[in-house]
Image (spheres, rainbow, N blue to C red):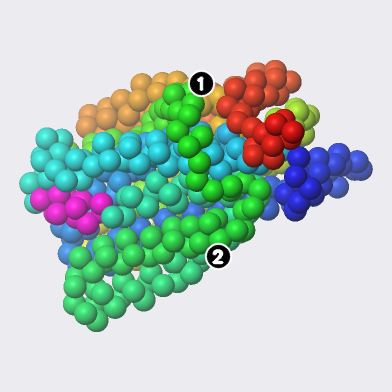
Amino acid sequence: MDNGLETKLLRHEEEEVEGTLTERVWTESKKIWRVALPGVISRVCAFGTIVITQSFVGHISDIDLAGYALVQTLSVRFVNGILLGMSSATETLCGQAFGAGQHHMMGIYLQRSWIVDLITLTILLPIFVFGTQVYRLLGEDEAIAESGGYLSLWFIPFVYNFVFSLTIQMFLQAQLKNMVIAWLSIFQFGIHIPLSWLLVYKLGFGVPGAMIALSASSWFLVIGEFIYIFGGWCPYSWKGFTVAAFKDLVPVVKLSISSGVMVCLELWYNAVLVLLAGYMANAEVAISAFSICLNINAWEFMISLGFLGAACVRIANELGRGNAKAAKFSIKVLLGTSIAIGTFFFVLCLVFGRKIAYLFTADERVADTVSELSVLLSFSVLLNSIYPVLSGVAVGAGMQGIVAVINLVTYYLIGIPTGALLGYLTDLQVKGIWIGMIGGIVTQTLALMYLTWRTDWDDQVKKSLERLNRFYVKSADEAEEISN
């Protein structure tokens, strides 16, 4: 094992904490926030650029707002779900490799994820090229479908940043170096607002200007990440490009697919609900209001994703170093912290429910619908504090396949049918769809709680070691020692 900064950090993390319960919680909380805070900042800022762009587009025209909502919620979320899910295999492997001290393998896992994700995204590109035809096929309103098809072409440069930004974040997060992403994300968000104003209003580019600003600010983040990794700030985990990245791709793809299914079923859930909203009597208002609430929910969900990432890293690290007891204690602290934050935002949404809508639109009909959904939105925000943490625990342990089955049953066999029945067979309309969504999430949360409770964590330690040994490639130093 290397005798550098990362090894010292690893040894420091391995130290058992003795003392009172309060002291143990405080020590574990510091470890969690070390991962969660940069993750929260980066995710909130990254998604914030999408929300800011929606705000600029929404003040240009209501049709463009509905078109943007359609593309962002259906096409972008569809692709993002696949790439995020497949990239979570990187999160599992890098987290466990770091915990086991196999630092050089992390760079190989990162390169393998780039190969898999680049091929996957290129295969999915026709979704954006033929956007109008896709939305017509789905039965969307003609004007909204044409607007969405036009905007989907502008999203192509933006979605390619996912290949690198998602995987690099997981790579750096696993080795507790994701603070650099937080600073880059803050700067990205800071330049996105004035850049959007300049292109949309000052230069008069309108909707294309908003889309150019979105892509430009997103790629700034990726370029900054490249400079950090290639510039020598990851000397133990990045040894340069290697042909070893092209080896053992099949087992990595298998783990990526199970991860992809798990996340896709979750992210597509909202997309299907927006699709159902598009079939309502007043589709333009229904889609606009529903997507505004979903984006507010998703923006707050970025905080929960920070804790999902922290859960994955903490569980993967502890399993990688063979400490099942520490993994179980970390789960308890993670849930307590996340629920406390979720309660705060629950109250916030209840208080400012109606006022939120005017950040995105001046249409009173849309604002009224958003106001009607505010109570349901608040409960969704509260649930966001629980199930992402439990999902992160499962990802850290490599149990993506089980979570995929849970998501399939709770979302698509319970949530969507319930929402469709309440939305179309009663007077609830959009509220009925949202109630169905909450029903699916509640069921999913209960299932994940049961999974976490029933898991044999000592057995997960053994599985973690087996997985690491299967993918292991000797470092250059080890190969040299053997040859000598």
Count of marks, rendered view: 2
Circle 2 sits in a helix, a strand or a loop, which is it?
helix
Numbered range of the magenta stretch: 146-156
- Give the labeled residue for mark 2: 183
Q: Is residue 312 left or right of residue 120?
A: right
Look at the picture and state if 358 lies above or below 163. below
- Which quadrant would the C terminus be assigned to in this image? top right
Instruction: Please give the residue where the numbered disc 1 appears in the rendered image.
Output: 402
Question: Is 294 one of the magenta-colored residues?
Answer: no
User: Which residue occupies the extreme right position in the image?
Assistant: 19
Q: Is mark 1 on a helix, strand or loop?
A: helix
Confirm whether the magenta stretch covers residue 149: yes
The percent position of residue 369, horizontal first and vertical second, equals 28, 52
**Which residue is at 20% across, 51% downward?**
152
Residue found 49% across the figure and 54% down from its top: 43
Asked which quadrant contains residue 258, the reply is top left
Q: How far apart are marks 2 and 1 (CA)?
A: 35 Å
User: If you read the primary sequence from the N terminus, does the residue marked by circle 2 or circle 1 appear first?
Assistant: 2
